[in-house]
Image (cartoon, rainbow, N blue to C red):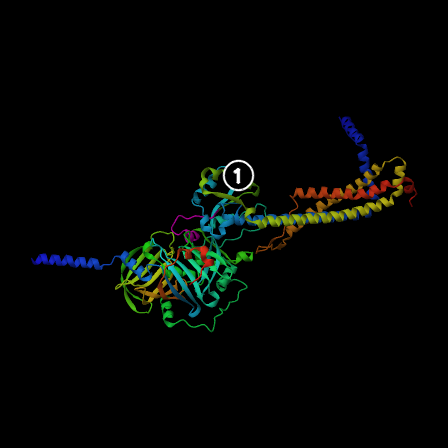
């Protein structure tokens, strides 16, 4: 009798442990949902750039983002709000296509991948990237990691490898997710040649659109660690974004309400 | 036997009696005023020399440019269709897959084997070179090459110029070595390490009013450690791979080499082919943007091209490849040639004009002095045409002797220049090369000059001669 009880207790315990051992895919999906809202949304982003310890640039952007129904990358329309010399300029990101529009000379130009190697355009996908569809996750363990506020957190470490070379900018990503709630803490993005390109810290968690989301991303360049960009997101709101806004030809007629 | 020979010569002389007489008479007339004839001859000699030496000089410049282009980019290049015109924006899209098979086919083909000296692949891509420790970067044009083949390319010297092949710093260097232009080295602040001249340290204009970064960010940044920087000459090269994703490689600069043309010098980066292929194709099958073919002689371009077209049509039909020769690839060559042809034509016309003036002046004076003689000749039955012929032939003989002398002296002068050891630096080159003037061997130019100036001299005697022949006989006889 006692043996039977012990056996059941053991198997229940094992089952419980198996359940507690996290599924990397599920963790990844959960972390994606924490970072990126599931429906069309808008927000205001403030970008502050620091080079060699000095603040060099500040931009305020209005971002209109619509998820891809197939779970792929978001399509985003970015409007420059501040500083005054940049007001009204638009950028349309559609997968790997990036279009820039300048209202002062009514010119729209495609920015090729070569032209996005340096500068803020190279930071864009780090903040909004949707990992679950394009990456295969492997749980490599649990460790203590310093987060964006220089506190220690206990985190799952996931090793992500791109499943397809098309349309992904980073072949390999190291992702640290908090063990308690799958919150992304830190991520390291690597190139095809296994060189560190970007390090990102996700911090300033606030309740936005029903979920505790990281409203600030600190991006440190891998090649020049003294180049730091801080992206702060505020004024989240659900918003139906018409398909026309995400077309390149509509850029010249775009008007924010 | 001897009688027969003398008969034959006598018959020949009898048949061409008149022509022979005219020639002898012309020569004897020319010696009547030796000083005037000699001065005219001198003018012609100087004129012929000017044309031949300038012509020889410009031929040498052309051949030398050709040698330079053939050393750098071979005689023919095989590229994807459209790469030459559109590929500079996106070189990865114009890669040649399976290039090893193509090169093997070129090297083993029985028709091409005796003609081809080198067949080597190259990859060209646009990227960004950065010295991130110093916080500077620059867009560059990266050439991936096979060092051993490039050394072989640089040995080509079909025209026998007294030059030594340029050394290739990449040859023998380790796989991560690269060579950059001096302009690139200056922007990346590697002047001291690479001994680049004309380089002052540019102070970074730091905005004094800028805010400092908040301490928590500085601490996070510090966690990453300093920019990867073992040696002073280590730089990173960023490029987009064939899928549009960023890729970066770390390389050591072994030398900063001046490229001659400033625009090229400011963007030039040369590396080993595998390194460049890793940047663009990563772990996938590597490709190249061009296959360079160098032949033994430049005049083999047409048959070699025909044979390569046959090979491509037979085995590589799907690859959509094009063959371009070095003149298409380097429009500068054709432009310079055309400029020198125009200059040569201009010099020829100029000298021709001078010869016309000198010879017609001489002939006018001669004719004026021999007015009585002309009158006498006509009085005893010589036709007008005969008088004209007399003087035209005198002019022609003067021209022939002058041109012949001029050619001989030009040959002497050009040999003197060629062994003199003078040197100069042509445009878009960096090191001085010996000054050479190629007259011996340029038979076409010599014949053209000889015949041309003889004709000019004959023609310039024609007008005064016509005038002389028209004079009424009585006035001519009475001339004092």
Q: Helix, strand or loop at disc 1? A: helix
Q: Which residue is mark 1?
A: B306
Note whether residue A148 is visible.
yes
- Residue sitting farthest toward the bottom: B209
| Quarter residue B100 falls in | top left
Q: Is residue B476 magenta?
A: no
Q: Position of residue B442 (x, y in %)?
A: 65, 44
Q: Give B3 or A87, whichever is nearer the viewer.
A: A87
Q: Residue at x 58, y 48 (%)?
A: B66
Residue B161 visible within the image = no
> Is residue A69 rendered to the left or right of residue B140?
left
User: Where are the magenta residues, as a range?
Assistant: B275-290
Q: Chain of mark 1?
A: B
How many dots with numbers? 1
Quadrant where the N terminus of chain B sits is top right
Query: In this orientation, which residue lies closer to the viewer: B320 or B32?
Result: B320
**Residue B84 image position (x, y, % from top left):** 51, 48
* Residue B158 position by quadrant: top right
Going by the image, does B296 lie left or right of B359?
left
Residue B396 to residue A149: above or below: above
- Sort mark 1 into few (<14), some (14-19) or many (20+) by Cα contacts within 10 Å: few
């Amino acid at each position: 009798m006692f043996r039977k009880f012990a056996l059941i207790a053991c198997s229940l315990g094992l089952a419980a442990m198996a359940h507690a051992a996290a599924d990397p895919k599920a963790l990844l999906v959960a972390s994606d949902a924490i970072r990126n809202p599931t429906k069309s949304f808008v927000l205001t982003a403030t970008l502050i750039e620091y080079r060699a310890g000095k603040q060099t640039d500040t931009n305020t952007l209005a971002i209109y983002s619509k998820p891809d129904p197939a779970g792929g990358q978001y399509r985003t329309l970015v409007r420059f709000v501040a500083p005054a010399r940049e007001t009204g300029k638009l950028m349309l990101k559609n997968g790997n296509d990036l279009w820039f529009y300048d209202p002062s000379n009514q010119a729209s130009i495609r920015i090729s991948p070569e032209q996005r190697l340096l500068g803020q355009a190279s930071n864009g996908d780090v903040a909004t990237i949707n990992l679950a569809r394009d990456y295969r996750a492997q749980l490599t363990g649990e460790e203590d990691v310093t987060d964006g506020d220089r506190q220690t957190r206990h985190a799952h470490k996931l090793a992500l490898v791109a499943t397809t070379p098309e349309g992904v900018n980073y072949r390999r990503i190291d992702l640290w997710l908090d063990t308690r709630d799958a919150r992304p803490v830190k991520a390291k993005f690597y190139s095809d040649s296994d060189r560190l390109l970007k390090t990102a810290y996700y911090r300033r968690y606030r309740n936005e659109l029903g979920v505790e989301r990281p409203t600030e991303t600190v991006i440190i360049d891998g090649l020049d660690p003294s180049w730091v960009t801080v992206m702060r997101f505020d004024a989240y709101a659900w918003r139906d974004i018409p398909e026309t806004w995400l077309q390149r030809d509509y850029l010249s007629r775009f008007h924010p309400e | 036997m001897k009688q027969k020979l003398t008969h034959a010569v006598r018959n020949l002389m009898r048949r061409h009696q008149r022509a022979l007489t005219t020639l002898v008479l012309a020569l004897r007339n020319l010696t009547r005023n030796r000083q005037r004839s000699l001065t005219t001859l001198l003018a012609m000699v100087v004129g012929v020399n000017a044309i031949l030496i300038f012509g020889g000089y410009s031929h040498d410049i052309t051949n030398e440019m050709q040698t330079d282009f053939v050393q750098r980019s071979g005689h023919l290049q095989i590229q994807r269709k459209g790469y030459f015109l559109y590929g500079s924006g996106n070189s990865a899209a114009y890669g040649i897959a399976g290039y090893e098979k193509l090169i093997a086919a070129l090297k083993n083909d029985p028709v091409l084997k005796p003609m081809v000296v080198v067949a080597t692949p190259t990859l060209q891509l646009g990227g960004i070179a950065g010295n991130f420790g110093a916080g500077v970067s620059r867009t560059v044009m990266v050439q991936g090459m096979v060092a051993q083949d490039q050394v072989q390319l640089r040995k080509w010297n079909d025209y026998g110029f007294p030059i030594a092949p340029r050394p290739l710093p990449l040859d023998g260097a380790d796989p991560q070595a690269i060579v950059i232009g001096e302009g690139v080295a200056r922007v990346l602040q590697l002047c001291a390490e690479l001994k680049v001249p004309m380089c002052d340290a540019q102070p970074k204009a730091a905005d004094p009013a800028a805010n400092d970064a908040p301490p928590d960010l500085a601490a996070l940044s510090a966690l990453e450690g300093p920019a990867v920087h073992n040696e002073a000459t280590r730089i990173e090269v960023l490029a987009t791979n064939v899928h549009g994703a960023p890729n970066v490689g770390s390389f050591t600069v072994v030398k900063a080499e001046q490229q001659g043309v400033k625009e090229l010098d400011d963007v030039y980066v040369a590396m080993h082919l595998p390194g460049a292929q890793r940047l663009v194709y990563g772990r996938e099958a590597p490709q190249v943007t061009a296959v360079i073919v160098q032949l033994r002689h430049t005049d083999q371009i047409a048959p070699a091209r025909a044979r390569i077209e046959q090979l491509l049509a037979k085995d590589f039909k799907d690859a959509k490849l094009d063959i371009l020769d070095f003149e298409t690839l380097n429009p500068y060559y054709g432009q310079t040639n055309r400029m020198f042809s125009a200059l040569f034509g201009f010099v020829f016309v100029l000298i021709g004009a001078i010869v016309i003036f000198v010879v017609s002046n001489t002939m006018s004076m001669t004719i004026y002095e021999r007015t009585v003689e002309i009158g006498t000749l006509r009085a005893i039955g010589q036709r007008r045409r005969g008088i004209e012929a007399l003087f035209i032939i005198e002019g022609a003989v003067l021209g022939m002797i002058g041109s012949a002398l001029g050619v001989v002296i030009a040959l002497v002068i050009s040999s003197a220049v060629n062994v003199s050891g003078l040197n100069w630096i042509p445009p878009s080159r960096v090191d001085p090369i010996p000054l050479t003037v190629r007259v011996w061997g340029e038979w076409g130019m010599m014949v053209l000059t000889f015949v041309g100036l003889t004709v000019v001299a004959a023609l310039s005697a024609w007008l005064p001669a016509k005038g002389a022949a028209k004079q009424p006989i009585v006035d001519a006889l009475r001339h004092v």
